[in-house]
């Protein structure tokens, strides 16, 4: 599927990743990148820091999130020698390409983009003017994302379902430019998503999300992880009462981590009234700590040696930049008739 293809993924450095992010996005993205490389494809993975400034204005927070995300991807097994791992803001051609793309981006696309629409809906619910607190960075963000994708001649963008619309916008913009100049100036990207990736519930049973404050912070220390796991909501039924595992939040989270044998053990224990909530929370805690052990050790190592990580990001930018430069040159030559 990936032979000879260019795969590109971007991640916004906002919020410290939690177990849902790690299992639902980070780990699968690293695996997919490594698979693509093994199959003879090219893999670009970048940290979308220009996207982050739309929402976060504190430099210290931005810097900290950048460090965390960079270290997490490296700790999770991204190979910076084989993948091209870089920071968006190290590639000045991206905003230049964005400027050219603006001229081919119908304003109506931005009005329809769901991140913007969600903010408008929130404002309406709160009885505020539609565009209250919405900056142009957020409004035009799909065009910047199109530049991220189109700069590197990307074939496939692995995405969560919420990002499909943005890749379609990138396709539409590149299609319009190619049609106008009657040549393939820009590669038309497609997306793929993995239907098998489950949504991990949070400690209250809703989707685990930083905005609900219901996360298991899997890169924190053991005590913090333990506290979160033991805060998973349970009821007051006694251990002996047989329970349907599917109704138990601890079990639902465990599903995202456990082996089939471990899962069966917990399910049977609950059905037969042989495992209490304390037991199953300990089982979940062990599974989280096992899953995260090696990754957290490496993460802590990279955080403590961040100068090395900076160097890796700089090397990644050195590899990525000539490709973006070539795309920019192609565009400028066509647009300005040079
Ligand atoms: P949050 O909901 O905490 O704000 P984001 O929306 O920033 O998380 O999501 C970042 C990535 O993590 C996305 O690709 C998203 O699909 C994935 N993700 C977030 N929460 C979960 C979850 N609970 N289960 C699985 N994947 C998740
Ligand atoms: N918009 C993506 C998100 O919110 C991050 C992103 C920026 C991205 N540019 C990209 C993802 C290009 C894929 C390709 O998660």
Image: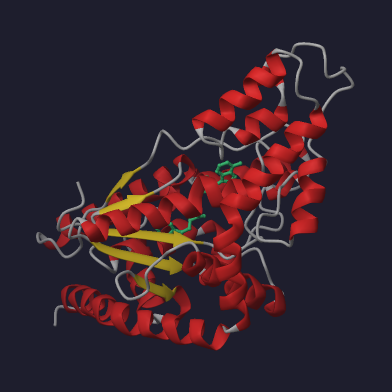
Query: Residue 228: x percent and y percent?
Result: 78, 47
Query: Residue 128: x percent and y percent?
Result: 77, 46
Name the residue: 41% across, 65% down. Answer: 78
Name the residue: 33% across, 58% down. Answer: 33
Instruction: Answer above or below: position of 279 versus 228.
Output: above
Q: Nearer the viewer, residue 101 or 19?
A: 19
Query: Residue 267: x percent and y percent?
Result: 63, 21
Instruction: Answer above or below: position of 70 versus 254.
Output: below
Name the residue: 25% across, 61% down. Answer: 37
User: Residue 87 sits in which quadrant?
Assistant: bottom left
Instruction: Answer above or below: position of 167 versus 90.
Output: above
Ligand 2's quadrant is bottom left
Query: Residue 248: x percent and y percent?
Result: 72, 24
State the quadrant of the C terminus: bottom left
User: Residue 249 sits in which quadrant?
Assistant: top right
Left or right of 297: which side holds 238?
Answer: right
Instruction: Answer above or below: position of 84 versus 14.
Output: below
């Amino acid at each position: 599927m990936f032979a000879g293809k260019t795969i590109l993924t971007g991640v916004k450095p906002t919020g410290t990743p939690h177990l849902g992010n790690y299992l639902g996005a980070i780990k699968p993205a690293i695996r997919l990148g490594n698979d693509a490389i093994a199959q003879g494809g090219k893999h670009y993975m970048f940290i979308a820091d220009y996207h982050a400034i739309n929402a976060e204005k504190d430099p210290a927070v931005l810097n900290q999130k950048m460090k965390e995300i960079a270290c997490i991807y490296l700790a999770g097994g991204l190979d910076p020698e084989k993948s091209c791992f870089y920071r968006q803001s190290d590639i000045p051609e991206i905003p230049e390409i964005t400027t050219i793309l603006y001229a081919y981006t119908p304003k109506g696309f931005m009005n329809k983009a769901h991140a913007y629409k969600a903010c408008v809906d929130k404002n309406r619910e709160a009885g505020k003017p539609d565009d209250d607190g919405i900056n142009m960075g957020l409004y035009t963000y799909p065009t910047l994302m199109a530049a991220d994708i189109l700069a590197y001649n990307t074939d496939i963008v692995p995405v969560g379902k919420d990002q499909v619309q943005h890749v379609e916008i990138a396709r539409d913009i590149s299609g319009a430019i190619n049609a106008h100049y009657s040549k393939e100036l820009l590669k038309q990207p497609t997306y793929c998503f993995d239907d098998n990736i489950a949504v991990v519930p949070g400690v209250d049973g809703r989707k685990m999300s930083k905005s609900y404050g219901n996360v298991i912070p899997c890169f924190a220390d053991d005590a913090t992880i333990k506290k979160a796991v033991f805060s998973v909501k349970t009821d007051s039924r006694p251990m002996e009462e047989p329970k349907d595992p599917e109704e138990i939040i601890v079990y639902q989270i465990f599903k995202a981590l456990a082996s089939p044998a471990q899962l069966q053990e917990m399910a049977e224990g609950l059905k037969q009234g042989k495992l209490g909530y304390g037991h199953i929370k300990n089982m979940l805690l062990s599974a989280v700590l096992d899953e995260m052990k090696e990754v957290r050790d490496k993460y802590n190592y990279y955080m403590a040696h961040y100068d090395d990580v900076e160097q890796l990001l700089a090397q990644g930018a050195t590899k990525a930049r000539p490709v973006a430069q070539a795309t920019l040159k192609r565009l400028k030559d066509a647009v300005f008739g040079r």
